Amino acid sequence: MSKNNRVWRLQERPVGNITNNTLSLEKENIPQPKDGECLFQLNYLSLDPTNRIWMSDETQYMPPVVLGEPMRGVVCGTVLESMTPDFKKGDIVSGIGTWSDYQIGSPESVGLLSQVDNVSAMDAFATLALVGPSAYFCLLDIGEPKAGETVVVSTAAGAVGSIAGQIAKIKGCRVVGLTGSDEKCRWIKEELGFDAAINYKTANLPDALSKSCPNGIDIYFDNVGGTILDECLKLMNLHGRIPTCGLISQYNALEPVPGPYNYSLILMHRLKIQGFIILDYLERFPEANESILKWMSEGKIKVRLDVSEGLETALDGVKKLYTGENNGKLMVRVKEI
Ligand SMILES: NC(=O)c1ccc[n+]([C@@H]2O[C@H](COP(=O)([O-])OP(=O)(O)OC[C@H]3O[C@@H](n4cnc5c(N)ncnc54)[C@H](OP(=O)(O)O)[C@@H]3O)[C@@H](O)[C@H]2O)c1
């Protein structure tokens, strides 16, 4: 049997940044599905900050990827062969899979991709497979925004942050975005309608936050932790909420990161800080997807994709998430649908 399947395997747990030695691309046989499984060909691979978490063996919300095993990823593919009544040949599926051309799926690991007219399969996968529902539930269920409140969002020009900020605008909030370049600031303000944008890499953060949030902060949608969290804590209003969606400033840390210096303000201002993991909301995805698709079709939510071509680009691609080189939802197109 010819080795037509390319598979990225985890070779080393990264210490600090992901390197070229972290994964290797191997040529292997195409796997055969068993009863209850299907074989699918990868169309799109989502690259996500959590890939770095899965590569490590720190305490996390899923088992770490085992050394030597295929790298785990959020995937979208076309069914080639099915041995389960849940899928038939030609179905487009998405869910948790691996960084490989051909792979085995089951009803437990993948489901049919939500598709609607006028939204391409790639846009639907990029927006609805993970990041849109994450922004939706983390902001609405944990943040509980009310019209007139001030919401600050970090990684505001990224996949989750840009959607969270736009949903907060839809809910009538004043929205301030933090991001790492002037171009990204321009995009979230001029194209997405954020009320203010701060380049956290060049601004004096305490001054810029105070100026952009004259009435304090009611919700800080935290995607980064670290210094930005500490600065936002200082401005949190009484009974403010901090949905903790991500901690990307810490994923490459070489040693344990100290807690927030302004921890006492959680007590003094009676703040709610709650961690969020999207896997807890899988059953409610249709609710989020319906709202997001409606807002997209009404022009109230805009998304931008940062797509690289070819499975071989995945390792170089994923590194961009930790430098801010990505412009929007980062993904790899392996084979167009
Ligand atoms: N809890 C969940 O279930 C869940 C689900 C999906 C995503 N997330 C989290 O959401 C966050 C954003 O993920 P995403 O997929 O939307 O990625 P993204 O925002 O599209 O890309 C990551 C961005 O993070 C920013 N960044 C990188 N290093 C940083 C640092 N040290 N300090 C501040 N910002 C930094 C960069 O933007 P700048 O140019 O703005 O610096 C980069 O573009 C991540 O923390 C991720 O773990 C959580």
Image: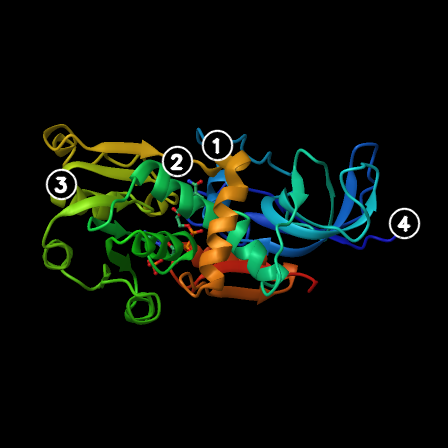
Compared to 46, does 86 lie above or below?
Answer: above
Q: Amino acid at mark 4?
A: Met
Kindly check if marks 4 and 1 are in contact, taking CB atoms under 8 A apart as contact.
Answer: no
Dot 2 beta carbon under 8 Å from ligand 1: yes
Mark 1 and mark 3 lie on one chain; the one further toward the N terminus is 3
Q: Which mark is residue 280?
A: 1
Looking at the rendered structure, the secondary structure element under dot 3 is: strand
Question: From where the camera sits, is residue 16 visible?
Answer: no
Kindly check if marks 1 and 2 are in contact, taking CB atoms under 8 A apart as contact.
Answer: yes
Mark 4 and mark 2 lie on one chain; the one further toward the N terminus is 4
Identify the residue at horizontal 26%, vertical 39% (top origin).
242
Residue bearing the label numbered 4: 1
Q: Nearer the viewer, residue 287 or 188?
A: 287
How much space separates mark 3 and mark 2, taking CA atoms?
A: 21 Å
How much space separates mark 1 and mark 2, taking CA atoms?
A: 8 Å
Q: Viewed as shown, does residue 227 lie left or right of 41?
A: left
Residue bearing the label numbered 2: 276
Mark 4 and mark 1 lie on one chain; the one further toward the N terminus is 4
How much space separates mark 4 and mark 1, taking CA atoms?
A: 41 Å
Looking at the rendered structure, the secondary structure element under dot 2 is: loop
Looking at the rendered structure, the secondary structure element under dot 4 is: loop
Q: Amino acid at mark 2?
A: Phe
Q: Amino acid at mark 1?
A: Asp
